Amino acid sequence: MKCSAPITAPTASRGRPREFDPDKALASALRVFWTRGYEGASMAELTEAMGITKPSLYACFGNKEALFKKALELYERDKLAYVGKALDAPTARGVAERLLNGAVATHCGTSDPHGCLGVISTVACATEDDSIREHVIARRIATEAAIAERFLRAQGEGDLPGSVDAKALAGCLTTVLQGMSVKAQGCLCPTELQGTVDSFLSMWPSR
């Protein structure tokens, strides 16, 4: 897909519109949202980072809310790819281990902003941004439901004790993951977060 950005020079009306790469522009917008949160990211910051004008942003991506949702999809596809891989782990404990270690690597990396885009945006959203908060929460709930379903399957396979509440365990895991994201945003050392991972796994219910 190609999107055209109007040139602001006087000769713009006599020439073709300048084309830009929407994928690169979206990646730049993602970085701004990831750093600032939905509410904290201004249109001026977004257009500057994306290298386009505000009319071009609206024409190619829609409004700020639509841009954020596209950026969130990119974030989940590229940065949270470990989540889908985690669900394919052969054991329930393996699922948790992959999720926790994946979170440490993603939210405490050296090349991307720290913390989780979803958590940052949910916490920072004001009342007028309820639609964004609800959108992010709905996606989190869907992920948590997928983890709970995987744990239920583990019970059926004899991998988890039948006495364990699979849904509650999934909720506990996602709560720990969200807490780790908040701490990562505060630049907590990855070694300390790894200690959280190790402590959580040490309490994993055994058969």
Image (tube, rainbow, N blue to C red):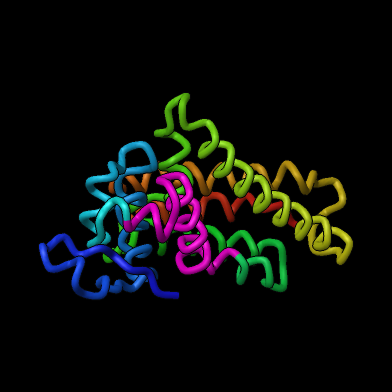
Q: Residue at x 73, y 41 (%)?
A: 168
Q: Is residue 105 left or right of residue 97?
A: left
Count of numbered circles in the view: 0
Q: Residue at x 40, y 34 (%)?
A: 124
The answer to which image quadrant residue 131 occupies is top right
> Can the viewer see residue 207 in this picture?
no
The answer to which image quadrant residue 4 occupies is bottom left
Work out whether residue 29 or residue 179 is closer to the camera in this orientation and state it: 29
Q: Is residue 186 left or right of residue 152?
A: left
Q: Position of residue 130 (x, y in %)?
A: 52, 31
Q: Residue at x 47, y 32 (%)?
A: 129
Q: Position of residue 116 (x, y in %)?
A: 43, 50
Q: Which residues are magenta?
A: 56-83
Q: Quadrant of the C terminus?
A: bottom right
Work out whether residue 117 or residue 9 is closer to the camera in this orientation and state it: 9
Which residue is most to the left?
10
Work out whether residue 55 or residue 163 is closer to the camera in this orientation and state it: 55
Q: Position of residue 84 (x, y in %)?
A: 62, 67
Q: Is residue 80 magenta-colored?
A: yes
Q: Residue at x 41, y 62 (%)?
A: 106
Q: Determine whether 89 is above or below 106 in the image.
A: below
Q: Position of residue 138 (x, y in %)?
A: 63, 44
Work out whether residue 70 or residue 1 is closer to the camera in this orientation and state it: 1
Q: Is residue 143 magenta-colored?
A: no
> Can the viewer see residue 160 in this picture?
yes
Q: Quadrant of the N terminus?
A: bottom left
Which residue is most to the front?
14
